[in-house]
Image (spheres, rainbow, N blue to C red):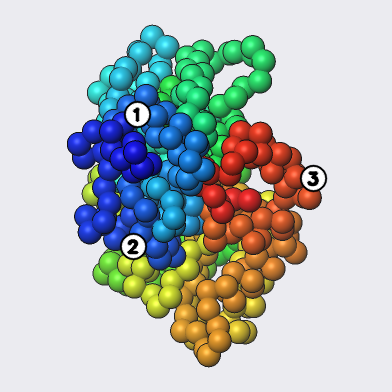
Amino acid sequence: MSLLEDLRSALGEGGVIEGETLAARTTSDMSGTGTSLPRAVLRPRSTAQLSAIMKLCHAAGAPVIPQGGLTGLAGGANAAGNAFSVSLELLRGIEEVDQASATMVVKAGTPLEDCQRAAVENGLFLALDLGSRGSCQIGGNLSTNAGGIRVIRYGMAREQVLGLEVVLADGTILSSMNRMLKNNAGYDLKHLFIGSEGTLGIITRAVLRLHPPPGEITTVLCAVQRYEDVVALLRRAQSVLGGILAFEAMWRDYFAFNTQALKLRVFEGSHPFCVILESTMPVDDIETFLAACLEDQLIQDALVARSHAQAREMWSVREGHPIEVLPNLLNFDVSLPIGQIGGYAEACTAALLARWPQAHVSFYGHVGDSNVHICVGTHYGPGEDMHDVDEIVYRVLGNYHGSISAEHGIGTLKRPYLHLSRSPEELALMRSLKQALDPKGILNPGKVI
């Protein structure tokens, strides 16, 4: 039998999609940089079926590319013509919510929003939250160590995981489904796979850590004059309002573009920065806090959302969907020490506009967790392309000793620049781990390292 015939036999009807039935969406994640259809799409319904896939592909030396919701932006799930794509869309469902231990056992193909909803239905709260919550899958979230808007209070995806089940390159099922907060029995193997983008193993199930509901959330939009005041506002809010849930800064150009496109009128006049702040403190306490900030000229204006609809309007500006119409739009996701973000934004903007004076360059980000995003849209001249933008963004970042990826992973798009954020010794150890766990190099080849 051929490898394809063996795979069809292992997966049954509907388990292998090939030929004319392959959908164009299987070529690329949301970066749009993938250009090849996979050899076939494999759709396991269980961990055992995925194990069978990997045993067959390992024996044949056939490359395998894991694909989740395809919402990534770094090319980490892009297909290749000689490789099989493994879609986890059928490996979905919530197996258990344990209220006593505040944990959830979930299959990797489950959309994040389904997990959030199940937590709420059981009187608990899943802290991980992303704009793509309706289509991204929990396995992909963990494979890229996703961040999102709650990191400032709850940490990255890594902090939401107690245990994992993973299928290795040779088909071995590694079950480390720990359900305890404290467990120091040797190496914590789950951290090998969280953030490794499917290059060391494919996550199939997870034990997620849940939290008590945060309570009623109040959303506030503040106008701020200087980046130094943005940082000062963050520190004062953390001190006075306690554990704030979100702190999102938007530079003037980003805020103006999206409010105009959404036909929203928020503040009189234009401000260099606008900040979304979320807190669970009583509204009276929040208003007292804002009044003191206004009196000290730490903020120039403020708007407290009086309804969920008004809060959603504020967040619609931050989520920035209108900006996707810009020509050749590139989205960057970097991190650097909080105090240096303002200086980096100025230097990076100046360098990009010196090369493309008509370009749109704008910044926004979580700031409180050292993460900032960059939007660049421009028309390239002869011989220019996206890599010319990459070179400028990452070259300037190198002057600030930042990281080329805060929460979106490395994939293929950032791989040439990984040396700017990792030492030769770190890269050598990464390659050693890859060789140890995937000696034939069949798991997501060409990604990360």
Residue 206 lies, in percent from the top left, at: 43, 25
In the foreground, 377 or 361: 377
What number is the disc on residue 321? 2
Q: Secondary structure at mark 1?
A: helix
Residue 251 lies, in percent from the top left, at: 50, 65
Q: Which residue is mark 3?
A: 425
What number is the disc on residue 49? 1
**Can residue 121 be seen by looking at this rendering?**
yes
- In the image, what residue occupies the spot 30% across and 24% down? 94
- In the image, what residue occupies the spot 48% across and 47% down? 63
Reply above or below: 52 against 448: above
What number is the disc on residue 413? none
Q: Dots 2 and 1: beta carbons under 8 Å? A: no
Quarter of the picture holding the N terminus: top left
* Residue type at numbered disc 1: Gln
* Residue type at numbered disc 3: Glu
